[in-house]
Image (spheres, coloured by chain):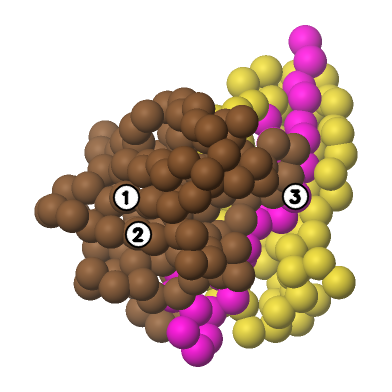
Chain colours: A yellow, B brown
Amino acid sequence: RKEVEQDPGPFNVPEGATVAFNCTYSNSASQSFFWYRQDCRKEPKLLMSVYSSGNEDGRFTAQLNRASQYISLLIRDSKLSDSATYLCVVNKGGGTSYGKLTFGQGTILTVHP
Amino acid sequence: EPEVTQTPSHQVTQMGQEVILRCVPISNHLYFYWYRQILGQKVEFLVSFYNNEISEKSEIFDDQFSVERPDGSNFTLKIRSTKLEDSAMYFCASSQNERQGITYEQYFGPGTRLTVT
């Protein structure tokens, strides 16, 4: 089983649509969770950290279910500028694992007019 | 807004040559990282660095790789004898704080595209 697994997509949605991405992780000891976005041939940019209580930042909502080892990202009212690859990222934590981030393969989103 | 910078943006080298990739982390950050991304693949962790020593390294980070913080601002990745399979985008990242098992947000530089011919 992959350490961090995402549906690769691609997701093609019209402007204004709501789209949801899912991610599962294999290590139950994982402690920190993030969503990054990556534009073509650019660096990953932090979108948001994900907390057990769930968190929202404008049009973006992230959820974490530790029991199911599942993370989600919901984007409401999609904009053309949301087109990117969305990366689910996990820090395993524990032991000497200081800061090692494990990335999913990414989910490609294309928002069209 | 403070950001991580990297130079060069693109490096072309011949197989067997040494390369040094340079990074300037965000100034008040204490933890530094290198990741790489082979074209079409996911981002992979290489090494983390804190207090002038390696905290953790991956299997990819073999004896051909080394990291250094030569002064108060730069953080470098050296590949001693490059191979074709080292061709990738190399990202530097930094974070402000960390404690065991809990990672705070890491911010990535724009990357250096390394092409080994």
The chain holding disc 1 is B
Residues behind callouts 2 and 3 on a single chain: no
Q: Nearer the viewer, residue A37 or A105?
A: A105
Q: Nearer the viewer, residue B23 or B59?
A: B59
Residue at left 25%, top 63%?
B30
**Residue A33: in sight, yes or no?**
no
Instruction: Give the residue at mark 1.
Output: B76
Q: Secondary structure at mark 1?
A: strand
Identify the mark at residue B98; answer none if there is no mark.
Answer: none
Quadrant housing the C terminus of chain A: top right
Q: CA distance from mark 2 to mark 1?
A: 5 Å
Q: Amino acid at mark 3?
A: Gln
Query: Tag 2: Cα neighbours inside 10 Å, few (<14), some, or many (≥20)?
Result: many
Residue positioned most to the top: A113
Instruction: Give the residue at mark 3.
Output: A105
Q: Amino acid at mark 1?
A: Thr
In the visual, does A41 lie left or right of A22? Answer: left
Q: Are marks 3 and 1 in contact (CB under 8 Å)?
A: no
The chain holding disc 2 is B
Judge whether A28 appears above or below B8 on screen.
Answer: below
In the visual, does A11 lie left or right of A104? Answer: right
Mark positioned earlier in the residue sequence (2 or 1): 2
The chain holding disc 3 is A
In the visual, does A110 lie left or right of A48? Answer: right
B103 magenta-colored: no
Identify the mark at residue B67; answer none if there is no mark.
Answer: 2
Q: Secondary structure at mark 3?
A: loop
Task: Kindly indicate the quadrant of the structure image that contains residue B29.
Answer: bottom left
Judge whether B52 appears above or below B78 on screen.
Answer: below
Q: Are marks 2 and 1 in contact (CB under 8 Å)?
A: yes
